[in-house]
Amino acid sequence: MIADEVVNVLIHSVKKGETLWSISEDYRVPLSNLILTNNITNPNMIMIGQQIIIPGLPDPNTIPYQIKVFLGRKKLQLLKNNVLIKEYPIAIGRILHATPSGSYVVVNRQPNPGGPFGSMWLSLSKKHYGIHGTNNPSSIGKAVSLGCIRMYNADVLELASTIPNGTLVNIN
């Protein structure tokens, strides 16, 4: 794939402190795929503001769905075409493990991931963070996680069955 031929794909703008390796980890894309897709000759020479094509994910602007997370209210909103469809209660990160604010996308999903992650795991484009179910439903509405967004199992299954990978997630 040559950059000039790409339409409707996710484009990542390099931020301070990022490396091609960290970008590949955040989006769960092999480094070699980023190098090939972006025609990069020296992976150690990327610049702040450089546009990196993320293969395998659509442009979030082409997806009608969007998720907004309100940390202070401990709520997650699902919107379709900028219209609120549903609001869900959530748990967020505790003080020492705050949920990171910013804009991310859902990069992949795993049903029944095991451990404390309940019935579904939706990976965000920030390594180690996601939206997931819980085996501790009494934690919903509290600041208790290690930074992830927890939902009731039925809610995260409903959300996952509605949104595609590439859906924009705004956390603030």
Image (tube, rainbow, N blue to C red):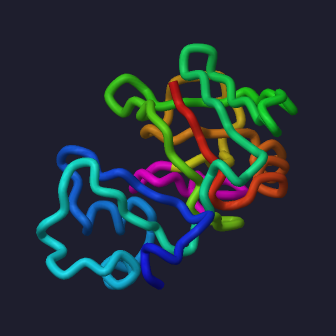
Residue shown at 36%/51% (left/top)?
13
Viewer-closest of 21 and 74: 21
Q: Is residue 71 left or right of residue 13?
A: right
Q: How many callouts does the rendering have?
A: 0
Is 167 situated above or below 45? Answer: above
Q: Is residue 152 left or right of residue 43?
A: right
Image x and y of residue 25, in percent: 36, 66
Q: Is residue 150 magenta?
A: no
Residue shown at 69%/65% (left/top)?
112
Q: Is residue 115 magenta?
A: yes
Image x and y of residue 141, in percent: 65, 22
Residue shown at 75%/47% (left/top)?
156
Q: Is residue 53 left or right of residue 168?
A: left
Image x and y of residue 65, in percent: 76, 45
Image x and y of residue 24, in percent: 35, 68
Q: Which residues are magenta?
A: 114-129
Residue shown at 66%/46% (left/top)?
134
Which residue of the protein is positioned furthest toward the front in this rendering? 4
Q: Is residue 109 left or right of residue 155?
A: left
- Residue 88's image quarter? top right
Is residue 122 among what the camera can see? no
